Amino acid sequence: MRDPRHDILFEPVRIGPVVAKNRFFQVPHCNGMGHAMPLAHAAMREVKAEGGWAVVSTEECEIHPSSDLTPYVEARLWDDRDIPALALMCEKVHAHGALAAVELTHNGPAASNLFSREVLLAPSHQPTKYGYPQQARAMDKADIREYRRWHREAAVRGMKAGMDIVYVYAAHDLSLAMHFLQRRRNQRTDEYGGSLENRVRLLRELVEDTKDAVGHRCGVALRFATEEMLGPEGVELAEARDIVAMLAELPDLWDVNVSAWYNDSLPSRFGGEAAQEPFVNFVKRATSKPVVGVGRFTSPDTMVSQIRRGVLDIIGAARPSIADPFLPRKIEEGRLDDIRECIGCNVCVSGDNTVSPIRCTQNPSMGEEWRKGWHPERIAPARKPEKVLVVGGGPAGLEAARALGQRGFEVALAEASKALGGRVAREAKLPGLAEWGRVRDWRVGQINKLRNVAVYLDSRLSAQDVLDFGAAHVVVATGARWRRDGAGRTHGAGLAGLADAANVFTPDDLMDGPLPEGSVAVYDDDGGYHATVLAEALARAGRQVHFVTPEDVVAPWGQFTLEYRHVRKRLASLGVQARVSQVLRALDGHELVLEDAWSGQTQLLHVDALVSVTSRLPEDALYHALLAREADWADAGVSSVTRIGDAEAPGLIAHAVYAGHRYAQELGEAKVGEVPFKRHFHHAGE
């Protein structure tokens, strides 16, 4: 039963000629599937509509070959041949009573045209945004007229595909409409440059063109970034207020956020729920049209507050809709403790940035809806509900136990420590990672509702204990430990003497015990988030911290998760000294011997302690002990022993959760072949 306090979230909202059935709006978000995988894309969007989102949007949708975003895979409406792919999405979304929206864009100097080989376009002559070795040429008046025509024709194609809302996109420093607003990109001296009124002219024309072309059937939304955090070089809040005032009543919907993407999809390490409110709360006071905004909203009380205080009319979400596509329905049904809350790790973002289908730490079915037929809420019942023993209560073990229990297996979960969570419980205590504890909390909450899942804490098992337990299937999810010997990408065999040095620490040491004293070097040959989080913890505790890495950048994985800029600023603000391209060659007492990765020159760095963040080893002793006793399995009633997650191959928490879910999905099911998922195939033809 829905809490009456949340009734306001389920009121309909008119957006031009269409009506959203409630106030939940899945704003445009990338997904790595786009035009290349239309069946997978449509299935993913359909699950959102099924889960109760009133509006389900595409990602960026290229309107012309001169805005080719290769290698990134987004939506396309270059010509009429692109209509069927988006029509499929509309059909799937409409089947559940939701509206479909398309975000039209021409990315100008933020495009690549690597596939189309067209010349890049921009307000003024300038380099490309992402460092491709060609420049964008300044658009003349004829180019502007053509751009407006392309946008108008793409809007009509979107309407023909069945879209209910068509976006004009001026956000994230990713569209010509925004580039014309920016002083740093627009140095024109004609009526499209100079004064703010002139720089807004093209945006106004695009909205007017779109309303004229499709406004009789489609709502026209304007996605606008109110702040770029770049000072006078970017769109600033004061100027944004004037822009909103100029265009206040023109669009049917304002979708407002901050720019660029790394500020909009802010990782939870650097900002919490509703972090964008100070930058968008003025918009609703300036217009009578509905306003949607984002803030990684997962709490219905926060959502209600946004509406009642006049910040927003509609709750926008990208990442929360990925973590839980059924978030609106769960609020409507009063099942708040079933909400799978986003943790803000941005693994979803990494899919687009690595040109691969979207993934989610919390929701292992994300991106697998069509490919594997997985659903975030439903799972096939067990064909034979046998007894399963899961050893290890970390992210892999918890997800395996939960999903196996949902399928109807009789599950026992044995955890060696006194608490569930494994690495998640430990990492969530580090600076900025508290919300990552939601991975544990949601699964523990769901397990507690399942009568067929028993949990045994403080239960370290030997191979004999496992055999005596009498389970038909054994899952070993015992995690991994960080190496102390320096073995990693740079030193495959480790460094002599490191493992035995009293002043060498691992991430496990820091998470389990007191921090080292004095001057500390954090050596990162892993490239993920662990080293920078530990460096922050040490600096906040008053240690002098040197961050040393053989990589040319600090924590390169953070470039895929939008953390990189924030990490560099955070470490700099804490006085952490970053030393890149420095290979650790030896530790001589308190002297680190560092070698420049390119010049070969060496230098000494005096430290009191070294934290080695290089690689991990699976904690797989139990697994191998069970394999050694395979001859005893039959007498013990054991049919299979499987290792999953970090106990098989250490990775991200997302990898562990996926491994646990995959095991649960596949147990007792027939093997489908060497390629265990569906693929898109492109055959010859025009």
Image (cartoon, grey):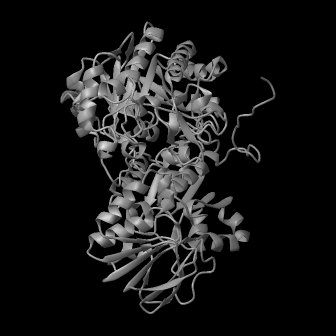
Quadrant housing the C terminus: top right
Q: Residue furthest top?
A: 216
Q: Position of residue 558 (x, y in %)?
A: 47, 56
x 64%, y 29%: residue: 39
x 37%, y 31%: residue: 181
Confirm whether residue 314 shows in the render.
no
x 29%, y 67%: residue: 574
Confirm whether residue 38 shows in the render.
yes
Q: Which of 196 and 250 lies nearest the eye of the viewer?
A: 196
**Is residue 437 left or right of 129 when viewed as pictured?**
left
Q: Quadrant of residue 308?
A: top left
**Is residue 167 left or right of 234 when viewed as pictured?**
right
x 39%, y 63%: residue: 427
**Is residue 541 left or right of 163 when viewed as pictured?**
left
Quadrant housing the N terminus: top left
Q: Position of residue 445 (x, y in %)?
A: 38, 48
- Residue 561 in the image: above or below residue 209: below
Q: Position of residue 69 (x, y in %)?
A: 58, 37
**Is residue 54 left or right of 583 when viewed as pictured?**
left
Q: Residue furthest right?
A: 684
Q: Position of residue 163 (x, y in %)?
A: 50, 17
All told, the count of numbered labels is 0
Q: Quadrant of residue 210?
A: top left
